[in-house]
Structures are given as C-alpha cells and as structure tokens.
Amino acid sequence: MAFKQLVFSGVQPTGNLHLGNYLGAIVKFVELQNKFDCIYCVVDLHAITTWQDPEELPRATREVTAAFIACGIDPKKHIVFNQSQVAEHAELAWVFNCVARMGWLNRMTQFKEKAGKDRENVSVGLFAYPTLMAADILVYRATHVPVGEDQKQHLELSRDIAQKFNNDYAASIAGHGFGDVFFPQPEPLIQGPATRVMSLRDGSKKMSKSDASDYSRINLTDDADAIAQKIRKAKTDPEPLPSEEKGLESRPEADNLVGIYAALQNTTKAEVLREFGGAQFSAFKSALVDLSVAKLGPIGGEMKRLVADPAYIDGILADGSDRARVLAAKTMAAVKDIVGLVRR
C-alpha cells in the first residue's frame, strides 16, 4: 500500500533552547517544510517522564513553539501543536504497550543511560517512552521522521511495533478494507551531516542546557552582547587555525568553532579553513561573532516578542491541535475497529 508522504517530528519543552538544538534540528525542520507536509509537535507528555515544575512547563512549551515560528516554520501551511492536546497520542500508546515486547524496551540504550544505576526508581513513563514515540509518529501514519543518532534506535522500535501490529491483525486489517498493512514503516530522514554542536567550554562534551555554566552554550534567546561575549570567551588553544580539516583532529575546541561557523554559513569546514587557515583565533572569533549575531540575533528578538504574547502562541497551538486531532481521530477509530474494541 502506498502511504501519503508526511513528516512528523517532536521537540521536548524542557526549557533553554540553544544553538545545538537550532543547528541539530530546527534548521532541518525549516528546510523540510519546502518538500513535505509536516507535523511539528511540542512533546509535553514526553517531558513529564521526569518531574517538571507545573509553573515552568507552560512557559517552556510556549518557548519551543515561539522558536519554531521565529526560525521560519509556517504554522498555517503545516501543523504546530502540543502533544497533550491530542488525546489519541496517549490512547494509541496504550495499544502499542500491548503490542511491544518487554525485551524490546529493555534493549533501549537511552533508557539505560537516563536511568543510570537507579533503574528501580525511575518512572514507568521513562521506560515506556519509546511506545509513546511510536504512537506520536504512527497516529498520523507518518512516513518520515528527521532523527539524530540518539533517536535512531527509537525509530527502529517504531518500525518493529508497526510491523507487529500489521502482522498480528493482518486478517482484521484486510477485513476492514485497509489492504495488506495499516501502518507504514516510518523512514529516518538524515539530511546531510548532522551538526553536532559541542560545549564552548569543553569541546569533548555536547552543548547542553543542563551545563552549570551559561558560557558553555549560546541560548536562542541571547542578545547580541551575550552572543559576542560567549564566543570571545569560548575555549581555544594557542595554535593558529589549520589550513586543512585533518589539522582539526586533535583540537576539539577549534573543530567545534569551525563547525559552528560552517553550519551558520551553510558551507563546509574545508571552505571555512580555506578562508581562515593560518589566522589567529582572535580574528576568526570576530568573524564568528558577526556571523552568529547576524543569524541568531533576529531569532532571539522574534522569540522574545512571541513569548511576550502567550495568547497568540496558545492560539497557534489550539489551531494546530484541532487540525492534528482530525487526522489522529481517523487513525484511532480505525485501530479500534481493527483491534475489536466496540465504539459508538
């Protein structure tokens, strides 16, 4: 069966979006909307797998929505909404809990990393997170998902769940007129080399909102002065920039800054080194400040403007949720029929 091409992606509202989120994900989302119909979801149900401050969660949800719009996602052409407003996500997740196997979830490396040694004490939600992620994608019968390395295993699980559902209920699927399969096998969308942005204080660690030092990251809401200060204070080494990429191999901080410049300029590291090879860091950092302020300054300004108008953002989320619910309800009605649940 041929499925209509549709992209689904979600971002957790856990506050403080930074340059890593922007270059690693949101830039790609903006590009995708030119080629596909897209559904962009603020996954607030995923956020509460670890405790969230109820005063803070609405602000973080609106901030992610503001970032989507400020970066160029069009909420009229595509769907932007928050997950908890469409109950079918949780409803399908329960069906998938009954399809997925414990052994599959036990193999999820991200759960092992997040739970650490205290596995008995984490929420059931954190363990079952991947079945909700499968429901997020498949409740729209989405065909493509932009994923980073850390989510590839979860997408594989979504494919396994779709396959098992299709196999387990094959006769019922056919009997209800859906042909051979009901759910598609969602494909990962890998768009060129992912920009892995590292900490400005330590080139061996990913840029993270949980780092104690605000100087380790550029937040999307930082103003021009903050961006400039953080780049000028970014850790470097005493050598000038190399002329070729090979010269970056044992220099993680230099590699990170060159990578950031290349991503913001939409070029390659090799091109950046052709221009700045042999230059001292002071000159390169000045150029990086100018580029970063030019690219990120308007986004930060627009985000602040949008966040100051929560009613506007809530209107976008409500409209997106209404449109998402139409698609999700259709899928869920069919799933209930296929599984044999009586409905009105």
Image (spheres, rainbow, N blue to C red):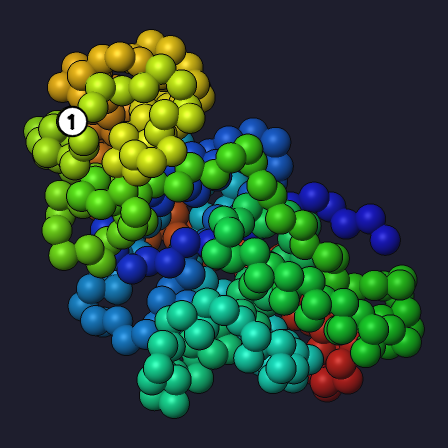
- What x and y, as percent, mark residue 197? 34, 40
Measured along the vertical axis of the image, is residue 159 above or below residue 193?
below
Residue 308 visible here:
no
Residue found at x 36% / y 77%: 116
Q: Relative to residue 58, is residue 73 drawn left or right?
A: right
Provide the secondary structure element on which disc 1 rests. Answer: loop
Which quadrant would residue 160 be assigned to in this image?
A: bottom right
* Image point (20%, 64%), residue name: 56
For residue 301, side relative to residue 157 (left or right): left
Position of 217 relative to 94 (above/below): above
Q: Viewer-proximal residue, 258 or 309?
A: 258
Residue 202 visible in the shown view: yes
Q: Residue furthest top?
A: 275
| Residue marked by disc 1 | 238
Within 10 Å of the Cα at label 1, are there few (<14), some (14-19), or many (20+) other Cα atoms? few
Residue type indicated by callout 1: Pro
**Depth order, front residue of 239/327:** 239
Name the quarter where the C terminus is drawn.
Answer: bottom right
Residue under the image location 85 percent in, 53 percent down? 1
Q: Is residue 2 left or right of residue 334?
A: right
Question: Residue 250: x, y in percent?
Answer: 33, 36
Picture coordinates of residue 78, whole percent (x, y):
52, 41
